[in-house]
Image (cartoon, coloured by chain):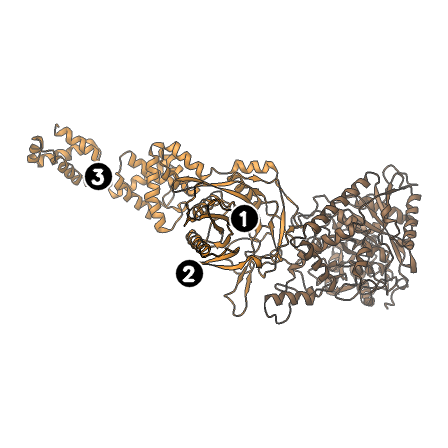
Chain colours: A orange, B brown
Amino acid sequence: MSAPLVQGYEVVIGFETHAQLATRSKIFSRAPTAFGAEPNTQACAVDLALPGTLPVMNREAVACAIRFGLAVGAHIAPRSVFARKNYFYPDLPKGYQISQYEIPVVQGGSVAFELAGAARTVRLVRAHLEEDAGKSLHQDFHGMSGIDLNRAGTPLLEIVTEPDLRSSAEAVAYAKALHQLVTWIGICDGNMQEGSFRCDANVSVRRPGAPLGTRREIKNLNSFKFMQQAIDYELRWQIERLQDGYAIEQATVLFDPDSGQTRAMRSKEDAADYRYFPCPDLPPLCIAPQWVEQLRAELPELPRAMAARFMADYGLPEYDAATLTQSPQMAAYFEAVVAATGQALAKSASNWIMGEVSRRLNAEERDIAQAPVSAALLAALLSRIGDQTVSNNAAKQVLDALWSQPPAAEAADAAACLACVDAVIAAKGLKQVSDSGALQAIVEQVLAANAKNVAEYRAGKEKAFNAFVGQVMKASQGKADPARVNALLKQLLGA
Amino acid sequence: MSAAHPDLHQMGVAELGAALHARQTSATEVAQHLLARAHAHSGLGAYLALNEAATLAQAAAADARLSAGERGPLLGVPLAHKDVLVTRDFPTTAGSKMLQGYRSPFDATVVQRFAAAGAVTLGKLNCDEFAMGSGNDQSAYGPAHNPWDRTRVPGGSSGGSAVAVAARLAPAATGTDTGGSIRQPASFCGVTGIKPTYGRCSRYGLVAYASSLDQAGPMARSALDCALLLSAMAGPDLDRDSTSLEQPLEDYSRYLAQPWPGASASRPLQGLRIGLPREFFGPGCASDVLQAVRAALNELERLGATLLDIDLPRTELAIPAYYIIAPAEASSNLSRYDGVRYGHRAAQPSDLLDLYQRSRSEAFGPEVQRRILLGTYVLSHGYYDAYYLKAQQIRRLIAQDFQAAFAQCDLIAGPVAPSVAWAIGAKTADPLAAYLADIYTLPASLAGLPGMSVPAGFGADHLPVGLQLIGNYLSEARLLQVAHQLQRVSDWHTRTPPPFTPCPGSHS
């Protein structure tokens, strides 16, 4: 892979991402995982690490890890091991975190994505299951810290890449692709503000061909914007440091969005000895091949495969295919529309979804799943454009009407949807006049009223033709089908 | 109150069950009698907590079930729990100042199972702090005294349990065994105790010492009583303990009245092959202990069993392996006692580190601190491979040695401990000497095998000696069968320490 150099340095970035798994209960207890509850109301005896409590593996969390492994083409370890990572902290109730260390459940795999139109791949080292810690609340109490254990025991999948990324833009593109993937397969809600998807970036620079430089780890990047800023700042800092003749020291750093700078939290010398050892409370995690095959069969079509199919089957351009496969909901909406309209209207459906529908959703900050106009209804509208009942422009007015006042009872079938659309067209008087008799009468009127211009046209002043069209459209109050108007005019003018 | 039945405390579990069924006594009467006895003999240091109201409420509930016609071997039978099993009705201290006054919001699974069977809880029993010790001299609440000689230790860590059963303060008790903590005190106090196969009884609610070894089991006056208790205690608990074995419930008394398969009633152990590990009968074992063990083995031989010598070549290695693995797990298991959420918290901590350091230094006793340090050391970066990993390899080899032995014999027998009970304080200053004395119980613990101690007579100073029986995985019913056959032809298990034999009524 040819890498762009920054001031003569090659950039090397690896990612560790913590994806919070979308399970109902915690990884080792039955307490709920919902976000935003009153402190310490979602922690049971196991989460509080009361004496005598023991962890029991949440099957759904394992299923999430397997789904991820299948989606990235990884090896699903038939036997993986949970280990204890020992350290003291007030929001770590047991005094150790249960994680996977030597033998993780997901091994290898890769994530493919696009950067500026070029295909890229990042190799994954592993993905392992672990529990989250609680939260220390340092601001809420004067002279004291509060502990909220609601998050303690929340299931996480830590996804670790090889140091394959060669620029901040590539790093962000990978993170976005990973985010899309974990939300697409439904194992993570992807909410970065709530911490459901947190990235740590290991950043180093080196002269081309030199061994890997010393890395610094930027922790807890929880927005794509900060991710790019933080990595760019860190790269500049490291290069300046090296150019000033210093060596980079291994460290963990935090990004401060206010100052736009990274600053060191702790150096390697402070690194704790976590005294990892296999957790004796949990037998090795053994995954039957049948279970893996069952989950493989249930795995949805992945976004990149789906985009390729959209291009092949519907003749969509790459941009449309990529846009429509941003979320399974949007893709499903598109496919539902096309299923109802027929493939001939696929590009029209794509245009309307990426344009009119998305614009309205974005303005209202809504997800496509909550669109007031259902796929069936949009399909009915597109059919009416297709059969020239309404013009493209007039159809936007119909969509507005349907959007602001959706049919009270969701139209049950295609016929009902059409009826619903037709009712709006009729009520707004937007029906395109394409009836030949009515249109011919209008055309004849216009020609009769402009005898002089007709004579001029016939004498060779062809520019007059457009004026006739304009007058016919005006006389029809915009409802005339322009193509038919053209045809009729040409016929009656005997051109 | 006990005038009608002055001998209630002399009755074992089976006898009490029968008397309760026959309505010759009531659960309330039995509980009151034993509570009075517990108060009268508080000097033994057996109990750490009583809650008369809770006990009598449980007894009344059992009586109501009996009145309604319900029957069950433990319905209305009182027993007491080692204080490492958490209970809602009683405080749970694990013998530590760290958990002084701690009250669990839930019952341990085994406690729950006994409650469901209608057993009545008398109280919580003394033990070494967090079950770390073999003399009950490491309890933060003072030692328990051996009823055969109050100047001697009762053994440990389930010392209070052994004392309560031996001194007839309770017909039975729960214990837990990590490296011998049921078998050794049973041996020292002349009671019958069984450590089941690892995973047979749920660990949920058992305050963890060494998770890969901890196992609860019953201590009582006979193999029969142990069988009745174990039938209630054992069983899968997969929703709460992932190391719990997926094995159906069992009636552990099912073989008791039967001869060994293929044997006749006159020689009921005909065909049974008992392996005697040469390593258990070496010069390290005191001669008075060996004599008693030999006598018991002779009884088994008279019942038809065949004795043969076998080898468990890595017996000595069990000591270092255990004292690496158990402290390693303990150092991690005890990290939760940090003064943050419950348990002892140092006064006026200056900062977080001070809170941790003082809370833990003030509330953990010397043996617990020693094992936390040992465990932290062996798990440390650079030492893990040399200690922990090596110990795990030895552990696997020890388990393999047992399997090789079980190709030759049906069960293994030997002493439980190399000596009878020692004087209180004799090994306090020399922890290594106490560790070495665990040599005969550690191998079965490391292998996860069931083991029991059966009274086998007396050694020096008329102190009890136990015969250890070790079976293959899940062979508890067979171990109990053999022990029961021995108890049919011997009376060692019925002996009562002299001060506790006189007629009660004079509770002094």
Is residue B343 in view?
yes
Relative placement, left or right, of B291 versus A249 is right
Residue B371 in percent (x, y) is at: 72, 59
Q: Nearer the viewer, mark 2 or mark 1?
A: 2
Quadrant of residue B133 in the image? Answer: bottom right
Report whether mark 2 lies on the same chain as mark 1: yes
Relative placement, left or right, of B480 versus A133 is right
**Label 1 amino acid?**
Glu
Q: Name the residue tied to disc 3.
A: A479
Calculate the distance from the C-alpha at mark 3 to the C-alpha at mark 2. 58 Å
> Residue extending furthest bottom?
B348
**Label 2 amino acid?**
Ser
Q: Residues within 10 Å of mark 2 (few under 14, many from 20)?
A: few
Q: Nearer the viewer, mark 3 or mark 2?
A: 2
Q: Label for residue A158?
A: 1
Subunit that carries the residue with mark 1? A
Quadrant of residue A349 in the image? Answer: top left
Residue B192 in percent (x, y) is at: 84, 53
Subunit that carries the residue with mark 3? A
Disc on the earlier residue, 1 or 3: 1
Look at the numbered discs 1 and 3 and tell me whether their residues touch, using CB distance below 8 Å: no
Report whether mark 1 lies on the same chain as mark 3: yes
Relative placement, left or right, of A377 versus B380 is left
Residue A361 in percent (x, y) is at: 36, 48
Calculate the distance from the C-alpha at mark 2 to the C-alpha at mark 1. 28 Å
Q: Name the residue tied to disc 2.
A: A259
Q: Nearer the viewer, residue B370 or B405?
A: B370
